[in-house]
Image (cartoon, rainbow, N blue to C red):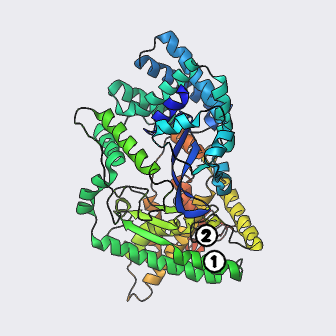
């Protein structure tokens, strides 16, 4: 009983040994909020880090064990105890890794939806006293529950039966430590960074002020956002994005009319989904209120207070209708998202800054950068995952089988194309893991290009800049926003965990599939950027 209690108490503070629990929409009735239990409890970024047998994987596990060992010394273990504890942690997490779904398996929303509720949970893991768990979690009456990986919860049950209290103590202590170490004093922060360094190759920790801003963004994001909005986001930015959204939506509508692999019923439902798609720009209509104690002298307490407050807010929504105005990213974030369950694309103020968007830049340049992002998010509504959700956000098959088959074939073309790219010598991309993002990138540049041409069709004259035509400026802008640099370790990790392709392939992969690029730069047919076997989805 005490394991369940401690687990609930930690999950109440969003520290995640074994699994995590949070709010989600019901895949079969997207208007309702339920709780979802997902696999978790690993200290390394991916299940395969524990299971792969190559030298790099073994070296990373060795670095991990040594890191856990040093961390356990910092929390008071003697060297011998710390060594044993580190081996114990690796053994337990390896069993969890074996029970976990792979990232590619997790791209199938149908397999992630297992609405089991409390009864089903008790069947999957009968040896965990769930009533104690939910009581400690602060949600004793929580009933509506989805489990993303039932086999994983069975694996948790096997561990509950097998492990002794002393082993649980080590595992739980480790997860409390790893979760809080970045927020603790210098020794802990340094040791936490030592693992980041092994995973990403980064040689220096980010400056302290940046980490402080990030912690504030996580704890009080919509408060931090308000002065940022005041300083950096005017009504002109909002209008500019709306212009882009409308132009891109129209371009997608026009394309839908031309796509030859569609049949009439699926085309109609695609139009309906497009018409229902919402967009949110800048910041939420209503600011979130925060209500927890903040003390000047106790940073970790503040962080835990913020996490517990957030977890209470999330679980408090379960069993209630959805609030469509809530945001999943904070306004200063330089990112954007599409939420298939809300059929909503969201563009925080943080991304509506140069080089993504500038009131001083030309239409071609803004559309190559921010327009591509808008097209990318819109296309997510129709990628390998998004296409399984209808316009109302429900997981349902609205495609005719023949069209679905053609769509899948087009996806295979893209998966094969990107799967052949090497990020490091001998290390290829995972074409299936990155499929949705690659489809979105391809659709994004294509839609943005069509929309930019449409916006400029009545222009009196072409704006040539330093010898570059407007078409060329558009493509240069696409390349410029994804300009980036990565260390080998980072690239090796990203290929396993990141559903996005590395930036170089996001640009070259999607533009090689767009004939307008080859035309803009007068590339001969059959060259790397004008391949004969180009792929096209949307
Ligand atoms: Zn994306």
Secondary structure at numbered mark 1: helix
Q: Which of 132 and 532 is in front in this view?
A: 132
Which quadrant is the C terminus positioned in? Answer: bottom right
Q: Residue at x 58, y 78 (%)?
A: 272
Location of mark 1 (residue): 269
Residue 37 spot, x, y in % from top left: 57, 45
- Sequence-first tag of 2 and 1: 1
Tell me, for residue 125, which label it has, or none: none
Location of mark 2 (residue): 390
Q: Residue at x 49, y 38 (%)?
A: 135
Number of residue marks: 2
Secondary structure at numbered mark 2: loop
Label 2 neighbour load within 10 Å: few <14, some 14-19, many 20+: many
Q: Which residue is drawn at 32% across and 70% down?
A: 237
Label 1 neighbour load within 10 Å: few <14, some 14-19, many 20+: some
Residue 315 spot, x, y in % from top left: 46, 49
């Amino acid at each position: 009983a005490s394991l369940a209690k401690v687990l609930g108490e930690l999950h109440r503070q969003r520290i995640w040994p074994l699994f995590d629990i949070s709010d989600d929409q019901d895949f079969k009735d997207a208007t309702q909020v339920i709780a979802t239990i997902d696999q978790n409890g690993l200290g390394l970024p991916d299940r395969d880090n524990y299971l792969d047998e190559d030298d790099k994987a073994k070296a990373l596990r060795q670095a991990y064990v040594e890191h856990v060992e040093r961390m356990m010394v910092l929390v008071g273990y003697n060297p011998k105890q710390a060594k044993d504890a580190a081996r114990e942690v690796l053994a337990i997490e390896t069993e969890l890794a074996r029970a976990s779904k792979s990232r590619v398996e997790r791209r199938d929303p149908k397999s992630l939806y297992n609405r089991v509720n409390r009864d089903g949970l008790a069947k999957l893991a009968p040896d965990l006293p769930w009533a104690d768990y939910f009581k400690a979690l602060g949600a004793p009456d929580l009933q509506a529950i989805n489990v993303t990986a039932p086999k994983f919860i069975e694996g948790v049950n096997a561990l509950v039966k097998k492990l002794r209290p002393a082993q649980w103590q080590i595992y739980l202590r480790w997860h409390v430590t790893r979760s809080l170490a970045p927020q603790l004093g210098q020794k802990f922060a340094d040791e936490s960074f030592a693992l980041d360094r092994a995973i990403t190759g980064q040689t220096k920790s980010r400056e302290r002020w940046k980490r402080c801003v990030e912690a504030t963004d996580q704890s009080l994001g919509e408060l931090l956002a308000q002065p940022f909005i005041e300083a950096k986001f005017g009504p002109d930015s909002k209008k500019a994005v709306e212009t882009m959204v409308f132009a891109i939506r129209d371009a997608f509508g026009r394309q839908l009319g031309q796509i030859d692999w569609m049949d009439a019923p699926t085309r109609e439902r695609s139009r309906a989904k497009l018409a229902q798609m919402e967009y949110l720009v800048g910041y939420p209509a209503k600011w979130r209120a925060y209500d927890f104690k903040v003390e000047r002298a106790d940073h970790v307490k503040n962080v835990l207070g913020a996490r517990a407050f957030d977890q209470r807010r999330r679980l408090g929504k379960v069993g209630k209708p959805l609030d469509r105005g809530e945001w999943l990213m904070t306004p200063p974030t330089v990112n954007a998202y599409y939420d298939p369950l809300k059929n909503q694309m969201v563009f925080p103020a943080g991304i509506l800054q140069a080089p993504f968007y500038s009131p001083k830049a030309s239409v071609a340049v803004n559309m190559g950068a921010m327009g591509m992002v808008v097209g990318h998010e819109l296309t997510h509504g129709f990628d390998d995952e998004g296409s399984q959700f209808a316009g109302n956000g429900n997981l349902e098959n609205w495609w005719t089988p023949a069209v679905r088959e053609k769509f899948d074939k087009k996806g295979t073309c893209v998966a094969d194309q990107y799967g052949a790219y090497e990020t490091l010598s001998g290390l290829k991309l995972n074409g299936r893991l990155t499929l949705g993002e690659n489809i979105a990138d391809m659709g994004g540049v294509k839609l943005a290009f069509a929309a930019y041409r449409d916006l400029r069709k009545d222009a009196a004259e072409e704006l040539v800049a330093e010898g570059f035509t407007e078409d060329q400026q558009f493509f240069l802008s696409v390349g410029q926003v994804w300009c980036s640099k990565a260390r080998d370790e980072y690239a090796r990790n990203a290929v396993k965990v990141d559903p996005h392709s590395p930036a170089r392939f996001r640009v070259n992969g999607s533009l090689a599939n767009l004939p307008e690029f080859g035309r803009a730069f007068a590339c001969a047919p059959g060259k790397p950027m004008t391949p004969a076997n180009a792929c096209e989805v949307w």
